[in-house]
Amino acid sequence: SKSTLFSFLERKAIEERRNVELALENANQMMSELRIALSGAEGRASALDTQLAR
């Protein structure tokens, strides 16, 4: 019947939303790690610049 199809679609939508939320969490975690790595690389580049300027 109509209501069974609706509840199936509703469950699928809830599941899909959860998957999107998890993907977003993963992307945010990755961005966070990349920012840390970039920050370290910038620090090393800056130190090299300082050495070369001498």
Image (tube, rainbow, N blue to C red):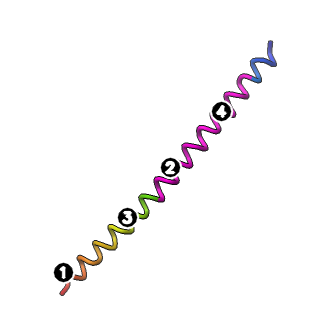
Query: Mark 2 falls on what kind of element?
Result: helix
Q: Which of marks 4 and 1 precedes in the sequence?
A: 4
- Residue at label 1? 52
Q: Residue at x 27, y 78 (%)?
A: 47
Q: Residue 45 at what x, y percent from top left?
A: 28, 72
- Residue at label 2? 27
Q: Residue at x 18, y 87 (%)?
A: 54
Query: Which label was assigned to residue 18?
Result: none
Q: Are marks 3 and 1 in contact (CB under 8 Å)?
A: no
Is 7 colored magenta in this rendering? no
Q: Which of marks 2 and 1 precedes in the sequence?
A: 2
Residue 39 lies in quadrant: bottom left
Alpha carbons under labels 3 and 1: distance apart: 21 Å
- Residue at label 4? 15
Question: Mark 3 Cα within 10 Å, few/some/many (few <14, many 20+)?
Answer: few
Alpha carbons under labels 1 and 4: distance apart: 55 Å
User: Could you tell me the amino acid type at mark 4?
Assistant: Glu
Query: Which label was assigned to residue 38?
Result: 3
Q: Which residues are magenta?
A: 8-32
